[in-house]
Amino acid sequence: MSGTWYKWLSLSAIVAVLDLYTKHLIQQAFAYGDLLPITSFFDLVRYHNEGSAFGFLNDAGGWQKWFFAAISVLAVIVMTYLIRKHRTEKLFCAGLALVLGGAIGNLYDRVTLGYVVDFLNFHYQNYYWPAFNVADSAICVGVALLLLDSFKKPN
C-alpha cells in the first residue's frame, strides 16, 4: 500500500478524533438540553439524536440504533475499499475520507451511547436548523466534494 492510502485514512482518523473530542467536551460541560447562546444565530447545546439525519426515526423505539449502526459499518467497509481502489483520485478520496471519518465518529456514539451527541445549533429568530456535530459537518463537506468530483468525470 502506498503512502497515499495512509494519507486518506489519516484524514478520516483526524475527523473522527476531532468529532469524539468535541462531543466529550460538550458532555462534560453540558447536561442534556442545556443551551449556551454564543451569537444571535448560534448556540451550543447538548442534544441526543437516536435517529439519523435531522432526527429521522428518533422515536422509533430503539431498533433504529442497530439498523443505523449496521448501515454505518457497511458504509465504512465500502468507503475504505473505494479509497484504497481510487487512492490517487484526490477530490474523490478527500470526499470519501471526510464521510468515512464522520461515519466512524457517529457510529462510535451510536454503539457506545445509544445515540449521537449533537451540539451545534444555528437559528434565525424562531427558525432552528436541527442541531448537528463535527461528524455531520465532515459528512456534508465530503458529500459536496463527491458531487463536485462527479461533475468533472467524463461519462
Image (cartoon, helix red, strand yellow):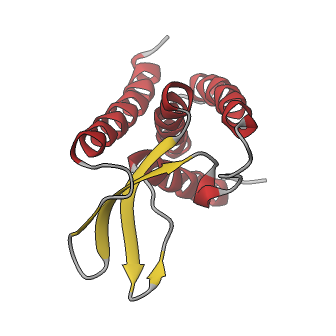
Residue 115 lies, with reference to residue 37, above or below; the image says above
The residue located at (30%, 72%) in the rendering is 42
> Depth check: 9 or 32 in front?
32
Report the residue that reaches farthest toward the right: 155
Q: Is 145 placed left or right of 41 in the picture?
A: right
Instruction: Point out residue 41 in the picture as x, y percentages from the top left corner.
Output: 31, 79
Where is residue 92, by image quadrant? Answer: top right
Q: Is 64 placed left or right of 148 in the picture?
A: right
Instruction: Point out residue 141 in the picture as x, y percentages from the top left corner.
Output: 47, 55
> Depth check: 132 or 87 in front?
132
Instruction: Point out residue 145 in the picture as x, y percentages from the top left corner.
Output: 52, 54
- Asked whether residue 121 appears in the rendered view, the answer is yes
Residue 55 lies, with reference to residue 130, above or below; the image says above
Q: Is 63 placed left or right of 72 in the picture?
A: right
Instruction: Point out residue 101 in the picture as x, y percentages from the top left corner.
Output: 46, 35
Figure label count? 0
The residue located at (44%, 86%) in the rendering is 126
Report the residue that reaches farthest toward the top: 1
Q: Is 145 placed left or right of 37 in the picture?
A: right
> Depth check: 136 or 14 in front?
136
The residue located at (28%, 35%) in the rendering is 21
